[in-house]
Image (cartoon, rainbow, N blue to C red):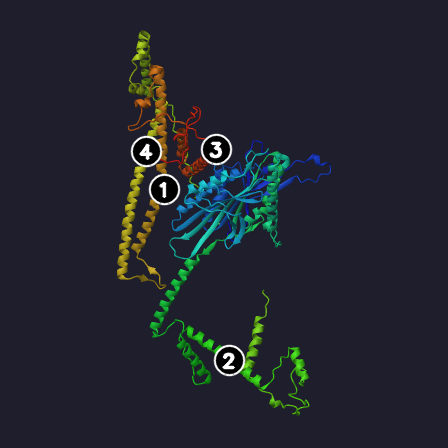
Amino acid sequence: MNKRSSKVRVFVRTRPTDKFAQDMIELNPDGKTVNIHAKKDVKRGVVNNQMLDWSFKMDGILHNASQDKVYEEVASPLVTQLLDGYNGTLLCYGQTGAGKTYTMTGATENYKQRGVIPRAIAQVYKEIEDRPEQAITVRISYLEIYNETMFDLLSTLPYSIQGLPQMTITEDEFGINIKGLSVHLAHNEEEALNLLFEGETNRAIASHALNSVSSRSHCIFTIHVESRSRTESNAKYIRSKFNLVDLAGSERLSKTGSEGKTQQEAVYINKSLTFLEQTTIALADRRREHIPYRQTKLTHCLKDSLGGNCNTIMIANVWGEAKQIEETISTMRFATRMMCVAVNPAVNEFFDPALLVKKLEKEIRHLKHELTMHDTLANRSQVSYEPLSDTQLLEVNNQVRRYLDGSLDEIDIVNIRQIQSIFGTFKSMVSQMDSEVESRLRQKYTIIDRMDPNAVAAAQKAGVVFDEDGGATYVGEVDGQGFGIGVAPASSKPAHSSVVSARKGRGRKAKERGSPQPKGVSSPSPTMERASPVRNGNVGPDTKESAVRTETASVAGSQGPAAEGGAQGRATPPLRTVAFEEFKHEKGKEINKILVENKDILKAKRKDCRDLAKSINMTKQEIDVTRNTIEKLRQEKAEQGDFVNEEGEMVISEEEFQMIRKLKELKASYRGDYDALRQIKSEIQYCQKLVDQCRQRLVNEFDNWYSECFLTTEEGQSSAVAGVGARPGTQYDMPEDEGEKFERLQSELLMENPDSASFYNAKMRTDRRQILESAVNQPQPHASSNRPRDVTSPTITIRNKPPSMMILQN
């Protein structure tokens, strides 16, 4: 993606349906073009100018795509650019029921069907682990816009600040800011997912004819990231955010059949989406000077996402059935308009004022030390760069006066402060000379302001005659009390002061200069595929013969005593260990074979794990030896002195270069082996679970077979309690209740995908807190010590509480 200038990218995702209108919607093989052919509406009459054919060009088509594919193609690059400092926005737009919320959030009960937001959270923290040189802080906010009113979906958390004023939208140096919206710090993936699930439970939903869980509000889930360098002590840091916008679906009241409150919600939703389209049209028109962002809360919140310095991608969700063709066309037309909006992604770099001040102070100290060294080398050790004292200022004043008088030929320049003081003294002296000249002129002459008509009229009444240029021609005239002196000669006019003339010329030049001049932004860890054990039914001839012989002997032994003694034969059944060995070669032959194969696989995995761990230890030892060798070489070089080339760069020896190269290769090998060790440990854990399951199944089937053949119902005892078929040290608990069964099933699901631990932990923690809150908020019955407890009422025990955390055991 071009970071300088680009357009909003749009992808189309179709909702999976058995009634896809293939005759009306054509998806081109290029994966980017959608052709729609609508049927003519006969209800419009004979004169029907209805447009029937459309062709839309998009950036990609996600037809019947999985959640994995959608995230990899659309959202994964945005998360990578987010940590590089680029803002990102992902919008889901479409009609109600088209799958917007499913795309964004997914199914919170199923890890594999999770949406874009949980996957983005997982990728953010995985990227943070891969960037140890940066200190990255992640914060989460969740905003809901319901009926043009903003709500904080995370305000129900226990540590949230209550009683905040109504939220308002403001703009600052960081962009759009919503005053009153809480922003929560998330230290790890589980905490971030917990915030997501908490906000999801507070969203407004309703049911209508097209969607049983229709979102009735626009929701904006924002991931705020702040990154600072751990290796550089500069004041620069990066701030970016990722807006994940789940828009409410546009509705046609004639199709949804909404009434009352649901109808009012639909009106607000359609109104805000209309204003969003108007804003999009205005942004696409370069001649528009005004963009109507403030028409609705939605467009105002997304101001820096629409046409700003943000990587923006939109997913157009469509419902590709014939009944929804009009809404599909409307969605595609909006998507085409959105592709015309230009964006200019840029890195959001800021400077910390406190760190910047410290940096500048440090630089000043360094420059002072460098200046002192320069003066010392130039034999100017007596020079001071501090502000001049009163005595020094007086000395500078005397030097300037002597220089003007001519008694001093030149002034010795010492430092910048002295130069500034000299120019200041010159300025003050020129101003003083102007004042003295003006005062002398006022003593000799009457100064009349020619721009003042009153002063000119008074002067004319006094007998002063002005020429065509406005200058006075006569100095005086007979007034009846004195005598006339006639016309003043030209030599009587005082000569112009050179200072005054220079000042006037400088004023004209300043006016000329002051006149105005014309100005010419690793994908989530792959889930480990469940390796089903190979169930091969082929058995060798020797095994078949032994099995036939064992079966014949067993039948003969069981028929003889039973026919003769009846119940006496059943009273002396064979030992469980003997019967278990017999069962493994007959009835339980298949499951026993699977158990043996799984044991072999587990044994091989453990051997690989030991070998890999041994290799990692050897690599670590080589790394230590190589690092020590490099240190010794550097110490020897420091003793001999550094070698530099003509450009002043340090030169290292060939031996040191080879050692550094070897150290780099060893570190890469160490990281690769360590990642492989982590993967094989998870595989061992999974294989161990399979072995335990196969062993338990073998024991259970043996119990059933042994009870049917040799025991009565009163004598029934499980082989687990008897210790048959168990590993040494294995302990079997009492039968599990519903809560324990739920934890076991969740653990088995977790074993299939170890990366889902944070997802399930956050989900269960949120559910547990809500159950506890609802139980606390229920009206409590009046306590009565004499009232007997109803035997049918449930009793709260430790077993009945919901699980608090999934624990991934080794």
Residue found at the very far right of the displayed protein: 46
Q: Marks 2 and 1, Cα distance to the nearest angstrom?
A: 82 Å
Q: Residue at x 42, y 78 (%)?
A: 394
Percent across and percent down for residue 168 are 54, 49
Q: Amino acid at mark 1?
A: Asp
Counting residues from the start of the chain, the first of labels 4 and 3 encountered is 4
Q: Can I make out residue 5 in this image?
A: no
**Eye-nearest disc, 1 or 4:** 1
Identify the secondary structure beneath mark 3.
loop
Identify the secondary structure beneath mark 1.
helix
Percent across and percent down for residue 333 are 61, 43
552 vs 419, nearest the viewer: 419
Counting residues from the start of the chain, the first of labels 4 and 2 encountered is 2
- Residue 675 badge: 1
Q: Marks 1 and 4, Cα distance to the nearest angstrom?
A: 18 Å
Q: Compared with residue 153, is residue 442 higher up or lower down, i.e. above or below?
A: below
User: Which residue has dot 3 on it?
Assistant: 779
- Residue 736 badge: none
Counting residues from the start of the chain, the first of labels 2 and 1 encountered is 2
Q: Residue at x 68, y 35 (%)?
A: 41
